[in-house]
């Protein structure tokens, strides 16, 4: 597959169909001018993938298809969507022909739609770039919030935290004061990052601001609570400084901040991704920007983020109290 600015070339082969039948499928696929499908054989496709000349090839059968993938590519999802649409349309036509065998069935174009957002491949590439930009913004905010909470561990070690607990101040005030500090830093960093993306880099993130703000607030709450949990579990600032990059990077990798989560096939990895706050935040942000989701549409991921934050906070505060009493 060779990529340029205007089209995507995809090699097509079949171990079941004749060359004529494969050519018929290729003709159907090529109705999208943004993609160029070419017939080849399995040996050639496999050799090209093995030599890293193409990232993937398409195998077609009479009523199904699958991809032979050498390495992941940002255009794979767009190609898959196009092929699926062609197969679905063909299947519906065959069902109609079977229902009305005495009639001649033909497809007539009644509406002509002019695309203004570019080709499917170009849009997929744009979405991929936007996903990475937002994912990295959330990723670096995790670093900032968690590293700032190293000060809380220092206070525990030098006795300042114990003196705060024993002071006339209520524990609720102490915890809320710490949370507000880290919460405010996270909001400022993410807000500044989005300001740079939209005003200096001309990245279009739409105008659906209210759902985005709610997602950011929920995400920062979950990360701040996660920091409290880490501080309660780890004994020394040095150990915490080592743990934070591991936790933050693993969270970003499993949550889809570095690459689209759709390309992952391993069920265990996908399960771990569901446990990462960054995954639910990133998916919500992309749905808000691309699909214009409202607050009602993102109730589930928001609930998951708030639940994670509550669990992290509850366990972390409980452990903090025990260590203080000890």
Image (cartoon, rainbow, N blue to C red):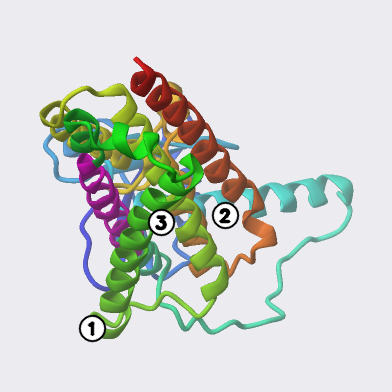
Q: Position of residue 8 (x, y in %)?
A: 31, 61
Q: CA distance from mark 3 to mark 1?
A: 29 Å
Q: Secondary structure at mark 2?
A: helix
Taking the image as shown, residue 8 lies to the left or right of residue 106, namely left
Q: Secondary structure at mark 3?
A: helix
Residues packed near mark 2 inside 10 Å, few (<14), some (14 to 19) or many (20 plus)? some
Given residues 90 and 16, the one toward you in this image is 90
Q: Which mark is residue 200?
A: 1
Magenta residues span 130-151
Farthest top residue in view:
326
Q: Specify which label sits upstream in the sequence, 2 or 3.
A: 2
| Residue 262 can be seen, yes or no | no
To which residue does mark 3 refer? 180
Q: Which mark is residue 86?
A: 2
Q: Specify which label sits upstream in the sequence, 2 or 1.
A: 2
Query: Is residue 15 shown above or below 59?
Result: above
Q: Is residue 135 magenta?
A: yes
């Amino acid at each position: 597959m060779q990529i340029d600015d205007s089209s995507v070339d995809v090699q097509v082969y079949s171990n079941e169909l004749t060359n004529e039948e494969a050519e018929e499928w290729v003709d159907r696929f090529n109705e999208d001018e943004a993609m160029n499908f070419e017939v080849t054989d399995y040996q050639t496709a496999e050799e090209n993938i093995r030599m890293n000349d193409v990232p993937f090839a398409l195998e077609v059968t009479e009523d199904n298809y699958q991809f032979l993938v050498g390495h992941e590519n940002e255009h794979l999802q767009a190609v898959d969507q196009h092929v699926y649409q062609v197969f679905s349309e063909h299947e519906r036509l065959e069902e109609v022909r079977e229902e009305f065998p005495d009639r001649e069935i033909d497809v007539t174009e009644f509406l002509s739609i002019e695309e203004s957002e570019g080709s499917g491949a170009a849009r997929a590439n744009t979405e991929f770039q936007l996903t990475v930009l937002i994912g990295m913004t959330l990723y670096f905010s995790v670093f900032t919030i968690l590293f700032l909470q190293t000060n809380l561990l220092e206070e525990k070690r030098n006795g300042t935290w114990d003196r705060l607990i024993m002071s006339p101040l209520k524990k609720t005030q102490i915890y809320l004061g710490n949370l507000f500090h880290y919460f405010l830093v996270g909001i400022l960093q993410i807000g500044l990052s989005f300001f740079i993306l939209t005003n200096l880099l001309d990245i279009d993130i739409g105008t659906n601001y209210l759902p985005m703000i709610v997602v950011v607030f929920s995400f920062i709450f979950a990360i701040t609570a996660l920091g409290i949990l880490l501080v309660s579990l780890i004994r020394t600032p040095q150990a915490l400084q080592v743990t934070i990059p591991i936790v933050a990077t693993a969270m970003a990798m499993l949550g889809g901040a570095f690459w689209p989560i759709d390309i992952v096939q391993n069920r265990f990895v996908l399960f771990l991704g569901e446990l990462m706050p960054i995954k639910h935040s990133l998916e919500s942000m992309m749905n808000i920007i691309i699909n214009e989701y409202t607050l009602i549409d993102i109730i589930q991921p928001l609930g998951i983020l708030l639940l994670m934050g509550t669990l992290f906070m509850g366990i972390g505060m409980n452990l903090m109290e025990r260590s203080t009493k000890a």
